[in-house]
Image: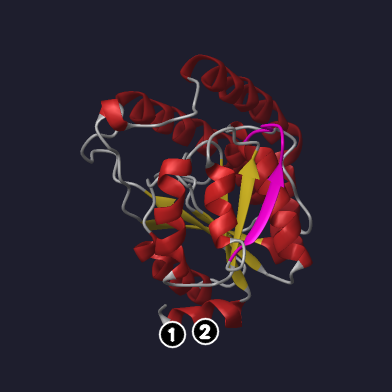
């Protein structure tokens, strides 16, 4: 373990939340990598039907484990992780995927950003031109980035990444109404409307060749859900989002 970073994360009240669904073949490596930096780890087993449960049994003494029998979606899993993190007294939670896409070596970037920008949300930003990134991911990200700016007035280079630092103390119990992949976009927009600063940091991302890639993103239905959410947020931005940001800016809250 890296004692210096572990101490900094404890001082800031920071944990790592890893939602996982049927990624048993990658989970052990992801946990080993994160545990090199911190012992403050919450894993949410989102109704996995593979050998994820067996993997987690080997780590149960080292990480906090939440499990339930039916898959409920990433948004629901994140909410369960946030609840447990708050119960344990954490002020920040870094979310990471369990499929090997994210690198624990980038955790120091989130710690540094949290120290430089207390109370901010920190968003990992991938290079969209990197090797093996699926074309549908590039399109979805550019699509999401555009509508996020329309809805909030904030520009971000990567609104689709799951590698983020959430300021739990600023969220005040905020949980996503949506339960699946679109929940991450929902939280990003709602936090922007609360005038929570959003700081991008460049991160690495691993995309194996197409034949080796495991993804639970369903291009048709999940993209439709995100599109419906974007449409809803455009109207909400007019009647609530922008007025809320203006009032909060004037009152400095």
Q: Residue 252: x and y, percent?
A: 72, 65
Local packing at callout 1 (Cα closer than 10 Å; few below 14, some 14-19, many 20+) is: few
Q: Secondary structure at mark 1?
A: helix
Q: Nearer the viewer, residue 217 or 120?
A: 217
Horizontal side of residue 137 vs 86, given as left or right? left
Q: Decide: marks 1, 2 in contact (CB < 8 A)?
A: yes
Q: Nearer the viewer, residue 253 or 60?
A: 60
x 63%, y 58%: residue: 196
Q: Is residue 64 magenta?
A: yes
Q: Which residues are magenta?
A: 63-73
Residue positioned most to the top: 220
Q: Nearer the viewer, residue 162 or 27?
A: 27
x 74%, y 72%: residue: 89
Measured in 3D between alpha carbons, the distance from the residue under mark 1 to the one under mark 2, in whole angstroms, is 5 Å
Is 119 rendered above or below residue 45? below
Point out the image quarter for the N terminus.
bottom left
Residue positioned most to the left: 131
Horizontal side of residue 135 vs 232, given as left or right? left
Q: How is the image coloured?
A: secondary structure
Q: Residue 228: x and y, percent?
A: 63, 20
Asked if residue 49 can be seen in this view, the reply is yes
Is 150 rendered above or below residue 122? above
Local packing at callout 2 (Cα closer than 10 Å; few below 14, some 14-19, many 20+) is: few
Location of mark 1 (residue)? 4
Q: Secondary structure at mark 2?
A: helix
Is 27 rendered above or below residue 201? above
Asked if residue 245 can be seen in this view, the reply is no
Query: Which mark, residue 7?
Result: 2
Q: Residue 231: x and y, percent?
A: 63, 22
């Amino acid at each position: 373990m890296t004692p210096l970073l572990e101490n900094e994360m404890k001082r800031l009240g920071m944990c790592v939340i890893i939602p996982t669904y049927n990624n048993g073949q990658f989970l052990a490596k992801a946990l080993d990598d994160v545990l090199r930096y911190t012992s403050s780890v919450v894993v949410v087993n989102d109704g996995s039907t593979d050998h994820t449960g067996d993997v987690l049994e080997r780590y149960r003494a080292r990480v906090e484990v939440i499990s339930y029998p039916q898959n409920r979606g990433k948004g629901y899993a994140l909410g369960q992780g946030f609840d447990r993190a708050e119960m344990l007294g954490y002020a920040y939670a870094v979310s990471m995927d369990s499929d090997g896409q994210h690198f624990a070596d980038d955790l120091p970037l989130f710690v540094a950003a949290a120290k430089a920008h207390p109370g901010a949300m920190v968003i990992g930003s991938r290079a969209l031109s990197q090797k093996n990134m699926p074309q549908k991911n590039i399109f979805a990200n550019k699509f999401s980035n555009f509508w996020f700016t329309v809805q909030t007035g904030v520009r971000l280079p990567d609104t689709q990444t799951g590698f983020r630092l959430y300021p739990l103390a600023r969220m005040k119990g905020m949980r996503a109404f949506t339960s699946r992949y679109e929940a991450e976009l929902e939280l990003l927009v709602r936090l922007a409307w609360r005038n929570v600063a959003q700081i991008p940091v460049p991160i690495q991302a691993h995309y194996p060749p197409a034949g080796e890639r495991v993804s639970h993103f369903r291009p048709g239905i999940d993209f439709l859900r995100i599109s419906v959410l974007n449409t809803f947020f455009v109207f909400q931005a007019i009647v609530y989002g922008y007025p809320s940001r203006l009032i909060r800016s004037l009152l400095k809250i």
